[in-house]
Amino acid sequence: MLAKMKHIEQYYEILGLKPGASLEEVKQAYRELAKVWHPDRFTKHPQLQQKGEEQLKKINEAYQWLKSYYTVLPQPEAHSYGDAQTYYKRGMEQAQGGKYWQAIESFTKALWINYQDAKAYKYRGLAYSQLGEHLKAIRDFNQAADLYWQRGNIEDYYDILFCISKLQNMVLQPLQERWRCIHTLKGHAYFVYAVAISPDRQTLVSGSTDGTIKLWDVRTGKALDTFKGHSGLFGYIQSLAISRDGRILVNGSNDKTIKIWQLSSRREVRNFTAHSGLFAGVKSVAISWDGTIVASGSDDKTIKLWDLQKGHSLETLTGHSGGVNSIAISPDGKILASGSSDHTIKLWQLEKGRSLHTLKGHTDTVNCVAFSPDGKILASCSGDRTIKLWQVSTVREIKTLKGHTDAVNSIAFSPDGLILVSGSGDKTIKLWQLGKGRKLRTLKGHTAAVHAVAISADGQTIASGSADKTIKIWGCD
């Protein structure tokens, strides 16, 4: 715990803040520093640009850690339940006076002391909604609804559900009506099996059975570069992953190898044979949250963990009886999920490399797995034409989404966790509202199976790769 607190103090220092600063102060400092050190400001000065990249990486890491820990940091002025009531009453007075940010801070302090205060969640949510922060309001309302339900406060529970429904309609209406194809990208000679969008939303990366990786400008649709190196009958690209800081691209190929690329310089920095055997193509790759580990899933039925910097093998996970088609690492870096041709999903403890649970329910090959941004939900899609949602903490299936008329090949969560995007052999992309499990929109335009989908960090852009040899970029006006 002391080591963790030491790290937190360092993160405050990186952002130029004193320990205990509010979340809004953290956000403001992050925005200002990100503008100051963004590498795009130094395009004519390579040394400054490199320093900018390094500083921005530190700033991003500090922001992510503080955002994660802000609700559990100790608050020295709060000691008792009575103090929680004092903060709650202060928040109510501030909200009634239209001082919504101050009210949010007071409600937050009340929740630091008494995290089961449903009213504090409710009225903090109302304050957020007044400021147009609808997604934060929905999260607080959901917390309040859970607490009211647990206590049997049915009337309050349904009042909150009404608030949630109203806000969700405001958030989701654009997603239902405003999606359109902005660009159709052509250049690959064969199927497009993998797509990824960089964290800064500037670059789209695609991988194809033609053995190449292409980089595209998301805004203009212009081709930027082509990475080569895989060749021959088994040289096609099956998977891509971009590190959280946007600096590293990892790809897996059916030729059994993994290549690591530096996106800023667009050069290959490492390659190694990852799996061995007659059928040992690398079907999936994932990068850990801290950027130190690469995981690979293969037709050889195994998952391997690698040191990203050195390319050394760290662990081999065995247990599937079929090829491993997809892997995903939870946002906290603790759990790895794998989907297999044996129709199952397995959860693994990443640190110790041991199997935790096997999830059964699909009746065909599991093609893709993905964690929600908060890590609470795991989504899986299958050749059985369904998408399943699983609660990670209880490993319980909570919902099955039906609507595709062919195999579902790829899935991706929106950054707020409210929407799931799916691509299918039926040539369509579908958008799903996760709370109700209903279909929001179907995007049509591809003339063959959709093998890959990705969504940008701001949730405003979707990319899809298809067997029709094209990539489509979809935008939300």
Image (cartoon, rainbow, N blue to C red):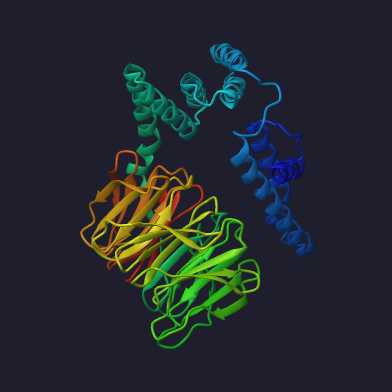
The quarter holding residue 32 reads: top right
- Residue 156 location, x and y as percent? 36, 18
Q: Name the one closer to the observer, 426 or 420.
A: 420
Q: Residue at x 68, y 54 (%)?
A: 57
Q: Residue at x 45, y 80 (%)?
A: 211
- Number of numbered discs overlaid on the protein picture: 0
- The answer to whether 288 appears left or right of 402 in the picture is right
The quarter holding residue 94 reads: top right
- Residue 410 location, x and y as percent? 36, 61
- Residue 304 vertical position relative to residue 66 in the rendered view, above or below: below
Q: Name the one closer to the observer, 82 or 10.
A: 82
Residue 253 seen by the camera: yes
- Residue 403 location, x and y as percent? 22, 52
In the image as oriented, which residue stretches furthest toward the bottom? 232
The C terminus sits in image quarter: top left
The N terminus sits in image quarter: top right
- Residue 289 vertical position relative to residue 126 in the rendered view, above or below: below
- Residue 42 location, x and y as percent? 74, 58
Q: Residue at x 48, y 77 (%)?
A: 212
Q: Name the one closer to the observer, 318 or 198.
A: 318
Q: Name the one closer to the observer, 325 or 225.
A: 325
Q: Residue at x 39, y 71 (%)?
A: 192
- The answer to whether 197 appears left or right of 437 in the picture is right
Residue 474 seen by the camera: no
- Residue 375 vertical position relative to residue 245 in the rendered view, above or below: above
